[in-house]
Image: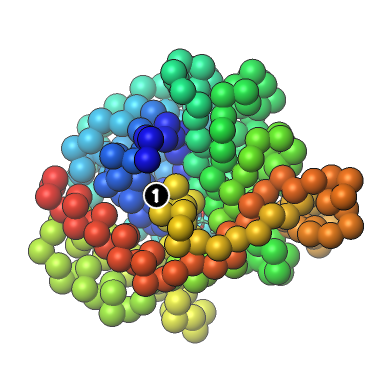
Amino acid sequence: MEKRNVLIDCDPGVDDVMALLLALANQDKLNILGVTTVSGNQTLAKVTKNIRKLWTFLGVEIPTACGASRPIIKEPLHGGEIHGESGMDGWDFPEPVFQLESDNGIVFLKDKIMESKGKVTLVPTGPLTNIGLLFSVFPETKEKIELISLMGGSIFSGNRTPFAEFNIYSDPEAAKIVFDSGIPIVMSGLEVTNQASIDDKEIEDLLTSEGMVSKMSGSLLNSYTNFHRSKGLDNYPLHDVVSVMYLIRPEIFKGRDYRIEIDTSKGVYRGRTAADTGELMKHNPSNTFVLMDTDREEFMKTFFHALKELDKLV
Ligand code: BDR
Ligand code: CA
């Protein structure tokens, strides 16, 4: 398989961290051109500090920039009750020494895309603000993007409102720009990400493992699951991991084509990824391949293997 050039746009966020770890462990398949942060699970300042902490902990040098500090129109919305006060609660990271390459994530993304020899795949795992701004300000970048593999949306029901998923609900105007861009999209929405869930036993195994990356991941996940437990849930979805996993192991997923329209109305459906399979598609063809199922066993096997590989580094 030829290496894919990827740019990851994220809001770490515990599951964002897990997605980044999976990408880092699979650099034989992914050429990581850079990473950008966006306001989402926590403020831009916090999520950016989180990625600097993570890179410092791992000792890696991935070009990184911070992007938008708020959605295009909406007021910022954060997910502190899930990811904690820092956005990455559960592990005592040392103060970061890693330095950002740029504090203008939109120009950074444009430069990385335009400088790339080959086409680029975008992997957004937070609100789509940076990508919406990128396409608005630098539309020439669209020509060089072969795929957007994103975590966001849902066909049947939301997790932030009854109809909308957090990332899309956080910035529906940006999401609309992205889904209307004409670029092929693979959407990892709640239908598939809820299947990619870790359980208590697996977290316990990570916590008691020898490797520092596995241990750190277990601690973050343990803190992340507190929220789900408090709601009486016993499944802890690794949402963002799915959008990276698809690029590494597409064969463990099933999905179908949909025409996705983003609801930007001010009513109860705001932020919904409205899906059409039938009549409308005759006039407006499919713009999104929506992942609907995964082989959980294979998914978890690949995820745990990635953490073990990274254990060798720290
Ligand atoms: C999405 O929202 C965030 O809390 C997670 O990081 C993920 O990107 C799931 O709805
Ligand atoms: Ca996220």
Hey, what amino acid is under mark 1? Ile
Residue 273: x and y, percent? 72, 55
Can residue 82 be seen by looking at this rendering?
A: no
| Residue holding disc 1 | 248
Which of 179/84 is in front? 179
Residue lying at the far bottom of the rendered structure: 232
Rendered location of residue 245, percent (x, y): 42, 53
Q: Residue at x 67, y 21 (%)?
A: 139
Q: Position of residue 105 (x, y in %)?
A: 49, 26
Q: Residue at x 42, y 31 (%)?
A: 5
Looking at the image, which is closer to me, 291 or 91?
A: 291
Which of the 4 image quadrants contains residue 8?
A: top left
Side (left or right) of 80 relative to 29: right
Report whether 50 appears left or right of 154: left
Say whether residue 117 is left or right of residue 309.
right
Q: How many marks?
A: 1
* Secondary element type, mark 1: helix
Image height of 190 relative to 36, above or below: below
**Quick check: 4 above or below 77?**
above
Give residue 147's quadrant in the image: top right
Indicate left or right for 45 with 194 as reference.
left
Residue drawn at point x = 44 percent, y = 18 percent: 117
Q: Return the x and y of residue 131 as percentages of the image width and height.
A: 60, 34
Q: In this rendering, does residue 278 appear at all?
A: yes
